[in-house]
Amino acid sequence: MNLIWVLVLVVCYNGVCLNGVTTNVTTRPPFVNIGALLSYNSTIGKVAKVAIQAAVDDVNSDPSVLGGTKLRLQMQNTNNSGFLGIVESLKFMETDTVAIIGPQSSVTAHFPYFIMTSRNDLYQMAAIAEIVDYYGWREVIAIYGDDDYGRNGIAALSDKLAERRCKISYKAPLTPTATQQEITDLLVEVALTESRILVVHTFSSWGPVVFSVAQHLGMMGPGYVWIATNWLSTLLETDHLSSDTLDDIQGVLTLRMYTPESELKRKFISRWSNLTRGTTGYGLNPIGPSTYGLYAYDTVWLLARAINAFLDQGGNISFSTESRLAKLRGGSLHLDAMNIFNGGELLRENILQANMTGVTGQLKFNPDGNLINPAYEVINVIGNGIRKIGYWTNYSGLSVTPPGTLYSNPPNRSSSSQNLYSVLWPGQTAQKPRGWVFPNNGRHLRIGVPNRVSYRDFVSQVPGTDMFTGYCIDVFTAAINLLPYAVPYKLIPYGDGIDNPSGTELVRLITAGVYDAAIGDIAIITNRTRMADFTQPYIESGLVVVAPVKKMNSSAWSFLKPFTRQMWGVTALFFIIVGAVVWILEHRLNDDFRGPPRRQLITILWFSFSTWFFAHRENTISTLGRFVLIIWLFVVLIINSSYTASLTSILTVQQLTSPIKGIDSLISSKDPIGYQQGSFTRDYLINELGIHKSRLISLKMPEDYAKALKDGPHKGGVAAVVDERAYLELFLSNQCEFSIVGREFTKNGWGFAFPRDSPLAVDLSTAILKLSENGDLQRIHDKWLLRSACSSQGAKLEVDRLDLRSFWGLYLICGIACLLALFIYFLKMVRQFSRHYSPELDSSGRGSTSARLQTFLSFVDEKEQEVKSRSKRRQLEMASNRNESMDNYSSKRRHIESPPDGSPQASNEA
């Protein structure tokens, strides 16, 4: 049985298609023949039979639909047989039928041309895949009918799951005639598998039997998730299920095609009881309406409107015979009597161009021939009914908002926008099931373990047994013991016991199916994560460089070692700069900074360098000078303290030195480099750092490390060894003549490897985090790896000299302070010069640029008090001259105005 509604049009036969258009005006025919192929004893067939007949009656009772033409319907029962459906469809072609509605078999539907007038199952499978991904599950089990309908549906589900990195881990097909015993045997096999997410895509006739058997086998309890396709929602809508059947499906999720609420829908549903009253074949309990019934009703109306458009376009309801079929005349099948509807292609185009509103909402086809805006309701079976927990649309995915509202907003597929209401899962639990258990089929996990030759403290096989010991084994065992379920496993050695095995190859064998997992000292690196999933790292271990070191005795020049050459140079330069700046700022005010040029130069040098000991005897008078000096003394305080601390460390702690400073010096040299056999280090040095493979030497044992490093590059050894820190720290615990040089230049850790999307990797990661939080991980580390390393004996490499990078911020602040003070001082000098000298230069005629510059330099070199005194005397002299001039002017005026005889009266008259 196919759980879709289709409209099949007999438009072509054997490649012949006619458009049926005539240029003559024709009268409308009194009736048009249409057919319906249904399985009367199926849930969908029962509902569709009533809905189709009701739609034909409604169309024929409304003359405005077909303009007086009526639909003449003939129904045939296919008895759930695809073959009978084909035979009946051929019979319809003998009776001048223009279209056939509703073959429920995929075989029948694909025999003629067809148009789907309900939701494509591809969308239903997309909705299920999104539900699985929404809850974080990765594997499902598919229980389905073993026919075209079931196989095609599960193939679509597999594709949609793969788009979300999920998959069907086990397929459980059932024949259409499966017995209860066959169903029981199949579910027993399912119960032994790992996944607990079961998708049931079956026939509604025996779908409830699956849940009944599952209930009997204890598979409807906590931990299980059952998702049924829309056959279950149809069954719930149409049939009155018994209490036992309802008990069997508690907590199940199912889908139902979404149809928006409307007045047309409410009126049709209110008529349903009248439509089914008196109908034979339904027993005492009448069937209820379902979404398939709604789509069946709308299908008839869609066909009627398309036929009306066809007739309005001048279409002619006419049929013709195929000449090649005439040769078959006289046979028992009467194939020569079949007719071809000449207007089939035009009618098909009218259907695809239709845009109407029915009881299911808007009916309009997209370019792919599917109805627009596919949507489903997500339903949870609870108690005696159902609970809607959300919606799925092809537009925005999962949402608790009705689809009609979503289409008015931009599509949003972000993970934060995907929502469903809470679910009551099987077993009456509200907690989301984990979705898987360790398979109870008696098979042990095959776990590959490196059969190491060196560094056996991490992992080693007990000679003569199949047991393993070591740090990595103890961590794995402790994590497994924290899991809430038992995990039977078997450790299998990987390697010949002669050479260290390759960790990358061990991980690859997981993808090849040789091992189910791999544990041990397996570094989590990029190319390995492409092949498998890893747990949370349980130890950090990046790549480092180990090289020979020698003791460095103190010398007469040890006091220079705290600073690098660059640091010494910049510090000395700033001493001179600050001294010069303070001299400039104090020169015009402070007698300590005046005198002959030689004395002034000595003052600058003495003042600047004496600030190192805060022993400068010259006082600063100017505000700007004090500002610069405060900033500089703060810088000196920091530098002095750092120098003292570094020098103390150099003189009190034994220093080690090595010609190799780290990975950079190794890359730039041509010396041979050692690496651990079987490690990823070789590929990293070649592919990532560009080191030629001829420089790399494979080393197996710690003793080989020591010998190669002692021999050195000139005696067949190596200049340094590059390996993971975890190994080298163990190596250095008893090799005090070597040390780690430079910084760790990669960051990675060790983890346990599992197949992609393995849920066991997630659970073990959680267990490792718990071990870290409760301190057990550190205790295991101390048990196996804690040693009295040479680094704890008071020696260290000379790698901590103070350089300019640590102090450039202080120097920057000091430099800015000096520039700011000089800038303010310069503005002040220009202002004073303009006030005291510019009028004098202008009046004397020496206003040229060179004259002004010479005068300005002389002005800057003068003591400010002398400039002010001279300026004051000049102002007094100028005032005195003005008074004298005024007196002379007044005397002269009196002389001119006096009469010759000097009589007072003459003067008064004047």
Image: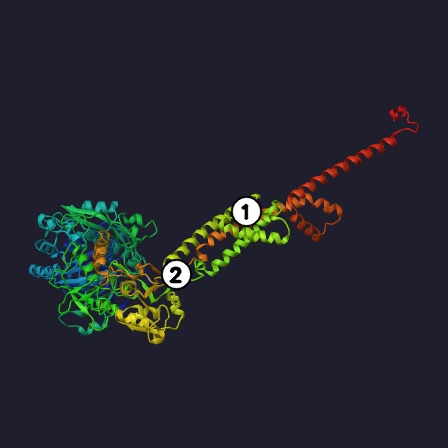
Along the horizontal axis of the image, is 892 left or right of 876? right
- Coloring scheme of the render? rainbow
- Residue 763: mark: none
Label 1 amino acid?
Arg
Instruction: Name the residue nearer the viewer: 88 or 292.
Output: 292
Q: Secondary structure at mark 1?
A: loop
In the displayed structure, 714 sits above or below 590; it is below
Asked if marks 2 and 1 touch (Cβ < 8 Å), the reply is no
Q: Is the residue marked by circle 2 packed among few (<14), some (14-19), or many (20+) residues within 10 Å? A: some
For the N terminus, give its image quadrant.
Answer: bottom left
Instruction: Name the residue nearer the viewer: 704 or 288.
Output: 704
Q: Which residue is mark 2?
A: 799
- Residue 617: mark: 1
Q: Is the residue marked by circle 1 packed among few (<14), some (14-19), or many (20+) residues within 10 Å? A: few
| Of callouts 2 and 1, the N-terminal one | 1
**Residue sitting at 64 percent across and 47 percent down?**
830
Task: For residue 70, say whether it is visible.
Answer: no
Q: Where in the figure is residue 770, as x and y percent of width and height?
A: 22, 53
Along the horizontal axis of the image, is 557 left or right of 606? left
Task: For residue 189, say whether it is visible.
Answer: yes
For the C terminus, give its image quadrant.
Answer: top right
